[in-house]
Amino acid sequence: MNYITTVVDDSTAVADAIAQLIRDKTLSKSRQDLPFNLAVSGGSTPKTLFQVLAQDEYRNTIPWQSVRLFWVDERCVPPTDAESNFGMTYDALLQYAFIPSSSIFRMKGEDVPEDEARRYADQLHKLLPVKDGVPVFDLILLGMGDDGHTASIFPDQMHLLHTGKDVAIATHPVSGQKRITLTGKVINATEQLIFMITGKGKAEIVATIVGQQEGAKKFPASYVHDKTGNTEFYLDKEAAAYLPAISIVS
Ligand code: 6PG
């Protein structure tokens, strides 16, 4: 695994750095008349990114018609539920109708989980480039929970990192809430993989993973990477607090 770490002041700076990267990548794809296939996660860290993307700075400079938006995971609730990752993204970004609705591919948390997992996997195979039988995103944006989970792959469900399925059903270990999630098979095939992690509560796990310490093995977040084995971490100073200076790129 090769970890590339970018450290900026705070969560807004993390969001702005990722927003700039999304703009650059989308412009590049747009110039090639190609879509930018982006999969996003839920949670408070991605929400800050969506709020930044909704600002004029990005609203007026990203060729939104080239963005095709997918989800990394979704709670098995209706899109109107407060728990919905799609609902959060709609409130923070999509309500401003930047991205054509025909380019928004949500996981339908209101449907039977197993049926939706199959439907979503089929949709990925139809819409994305497929290499060695695996759908390939241009960019997957991940968050990381306080327990080291990512996507909806929790420490007690590590098999989802290695399953032959592209999309699977997970269960939140505390609430029992069912989740639909991309699996390690799809996540690890992506062109680019970025973790957005902020806050001091995650600093210890970040240092354990980036430092490739023995304890990292119990965290699902330590097993994901892009197709070349790289994993990029965009961190605020709090989340990077325990990293040795040499691993701080900027
Ligand atoms: C989810 C997410 C999950 C999230 C992390 C980080 O559906 O909850 O996909 O993986 O990204 O738990 O969440 P925070 O950014 O809120 O800490």
Image (cartoon, grey):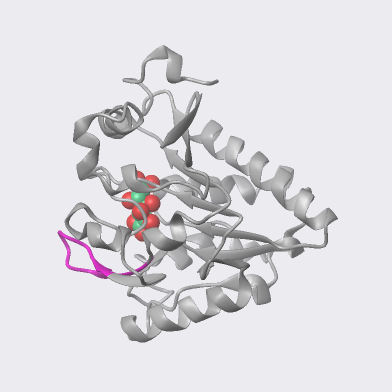
Q: Position of residue 161 (x, y in %)?
A: 31, 58
Residue sitting nearer the eye, 175 or 39: 39
Please give the range of residues in magenta. Answer: 170-181
Residue 46 to residue 73: above or below: above
Which quadrant would the N terminus be assigned to in this image? top left
Residue sitting nearer the eye, 249 or 97: 249
Q: Position of residue 238 (x, y in %)?
A: 37, 25
Q: Which residue sits at x=29%, y=63%? A: 160
* Residue at the extreme top of the image, as rendered: 245
Q: In the rendered picture of this protein, how many numbered marks are placed on residues?
A: 0
Residue 53 to residue 107: above or below: above
Q: Which residue sits at x=30%, y=29%? A: 203
Magenta segment includes 177: yes
Q: Position of residue 194 (x, y in %)?
A: 50, 43
* Residue at the extreme front of the image, as rendered: 132
Q: Position of residue 103 (x, y in %)?
A: 66, 71
Toward which corner of the image does residue 211 lie, by quadrant? top left
Toward which corner of the image does residue 201 lie, by quadrant? top left
Residue 247 to residue 154: above or below: above
Magenta segment includes 152: no
Does residue 62 appear anywhere in the picture? no
Residue sitting nearer the eye, 99 or 33: 33
Give the left or right position of residue 248, taking residue 34 as reference: left
Q: Which residue sits at x=45%, y=42%? A: 195
Does residue 16 appear anywhere in the picture? yes
